Amino acid sequence: MVSNSTNNLFRSRQVSTSRFDEAFKAFIMFGAAMIYAGVLLGPWGTLKDAAYNVGTGTWFIYAAVFLAIIFIVLPGIFTLGIMTTKGRQSLKQRFMSLSTALIPLGLMFWVAFSLSFVLTNASYILAALSDPLGLGWNLFGTANAAWQPMLTTILAPAQTLALVVGLVWSARTAQKVNEAGTSTIPVIVYCFVATSIMLWLLL
């Protein structure tokens, strides 16, 4: 009897720890996308230098801020938001379940971020198709095609669409995983603010 109770408690803790890890994976996913967008696409040269100069003092400061944003600031603001609601579950349980709503947001953040490079460098695909092994081939006559950005006119609308899809998807996910029966408005507002910041960084 004691052994069974101990095993059940151990399994329960394992499940709780696993869900807690998954919750922070969501913050890593969408938080990293926002930071990388700021570093690679933003106008801040000092930030770029700090990120690129690995091993320097400024890089360590950048790394510390990077980790603080992902593991303290973003989860902290999220927690403050869901603290305004009450339900049958504890705050920790609500944190673990409602943070699932951030996964679609993070996924679409990365889609929007990646479009900046995919569309800009799409012309390289033509050269790669003609010489896929780098052996000097010119199978389709495009091996020496000059680089030029492609589909630039649809970049901004495509990124905006991806972010809007992520926001709506996250809002619907928050409603589905809301086991406590509390208001999901704080989560939706959180996602909306994060989406607005990401849109500003991209555009």
Image (tube, grey):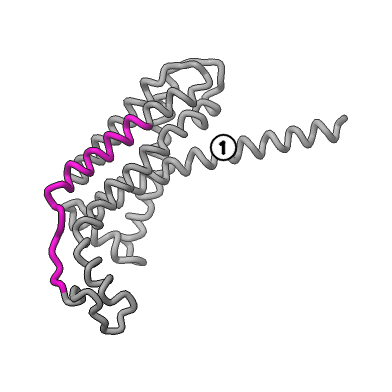
* Depth check, front residue: 201 or 83: 201
Nearer to us in this view, 101 or 65:
101
* Location of residue 145 in the rendering, given as x and y in whole percent from the top left corner: 15, 72
Residue 5 lies in the magenta stretch: no
Q: Check if residue 166 falls in the magenta segment.
A: yes
Picture quarter with the N terminus: top right
- The residue drawn where x is 33% and y is 29% is 168
Q: Main secondary structure of the magenta part?
A: helix
Above or below residue 96? Residue 156 is below
Q: Tell me how many marks there are.
A: 1
Quadrant of the drawing holding the C terminus? top left
Q: Residue at x 56, y 16 (%)?
A: 88
Residue 169: give x, y in percent of width and height. 36, 32
Q: Residues within 10 Å of mark 1 (few under 14, many from 20)?
A: some
Which residue is depicted at the point 38% across and 52% down?
64
The image shows residue 30 at horizontal and vertical percentages of 37, 43
Drawn side of residue 103 relative to residue 189, left or right: right
Q: Position of residue 55 (x, y in %)?
A: 36, 66
Amino acid type of the residue tagged 1 in the rendering: Arg
* Camera-nearest residue between 67 and 150: 150
**SS assignment at label 1:** helix
Q: Which residues are magenta?
A: 145-169
Most distant residue in the front direction: 140
Please tell me in which quadrant of the rendered image residue 63 appears.
Answer: bottom left
Residue depicted at 55% across the width and 38% down the height? 20
Query: Which quadrant would residue 59 be assigned to in this image?
Result: bottom left
The residue under label 1 is 19
Residue extending farthest bottom: 136
Residue 161, compared with residue 154, is above or below; it is above
Depth check: give the residue in front, 186 or 163.
163
